[in-house]
Amino acid sequence: MSVRTQSSEQSAEAVHRAGFACFVGRPNAGKSTLTNALVGQKVAITANQPQTTRHTVRGIVHREDAQLILVDTPGLHKPRTLLGERLNDVVRTTWAEVDVIGFCLPANEKIGPGDRFIAKELAGIKKTPKVAIVTKTDLVDSKTLAEQLIAIDQLGRELGIEWAEIVPVSAVGDKQVSLLADLLIPLLPEGPALYPEGDLTDEPEQVMIAELIREAALEGVRDELPHSIAVVVEEMLPREDRPADKPLLDIHANVYIERPSQKGIIIGPKGKRLKDVGIKSRKQIEALLGTPVFLDLHVKVA
């Protein structure tokens, strides 16, 4: 078993590589946080609850000798609903199309049935190289980490998965994150960059804006509304009568919930909660777009 820590030597020949990697793992294994740490900017939505990533968000890591495109799939889990099954189909389709798969297992939780479920699925995908990534290493001591590394090695042997690498990382503590990129890149095919330099994601702006609003709306109510919120940006229009040096973008968005009873939770007493959601997400949207924004939010029952 080769566990990697910092100080891997660089290869001498200069070839350019470009390709796709995806992080898999049960919900909350730290996939989105890791994507953001690698890209160096917030591109995938992170929330302290499972199932927040509904669709593929790509983060792009630019290096002189490589371009690593991260595809963030929804967490794979035993489906209990039709939506769950659809999400799982999305996951499998994505796995079949990427150049390398990173399997995220948190250092602070023993390998459980959910991890085994995913590992078995992974074992069925023969051609794609797989890297085991031990996340959240900042939460454990070295003995616990060592035990987890051995358990992951063992899991691979049991199911016939040959890990290309086993890498402990802490996205929050920024430990070994760049090493992880160094180890993923050699597993990519040779080829020119697939995206222009400076692009961090190919997610359309409207989708990212919807995600930021959804993240703000989920904050603080995760117990009452596990994840039954969808956000749709209806329109984005520059305000017409503004001087060129003081532009304003009008964004109209609907927050959809499943039941009328959830409306009060999102809106809050005297509309305070919805106002807070608007203020919080507006700041992030302005940071994302680099322009002042007027955000108009409405809550609707889907």
Image (tube, grey):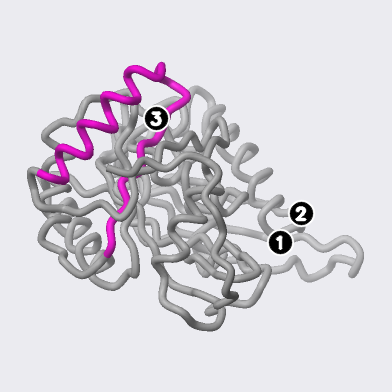
The quarter of the displayed image where residue 299 is located: top left
66 relative to 44, above or below: below
Discs 1, 2 touching: Cβ within 8 Å? yes
Left or right: where 6 falls relative to 302? right
* Label located before the other in sequence (1 or 2): 1
128 relative to 135, above or below: below
* Label located before the other in sequence (3 or 2): 3
Residue position marked by numbered label 2 in the rendering: 292
Residue 264 is tagged as: 3
- Residue 261 x/y as whole percent: 29, 32
Left or right: where 163 falls relative to 196? left
Query: Residue pushed farthest bottom?
Result: 192
At x 28% / y 56%, what residue is drawn? 130
Nearest to the observer: residue 176 or residue 13: 13
Residue 171 is tagged as: none
Residue type at numbered disc 3: Gly
Magenta residues (range) = 129-157
> Which element carries disc 3, helix, strand or loop?
helix
Residue 249 is tagged as: 1
At x 36% / y 44%, what residue is drawn? 52
- Residue 188 x/y as whole percent: 41, 70
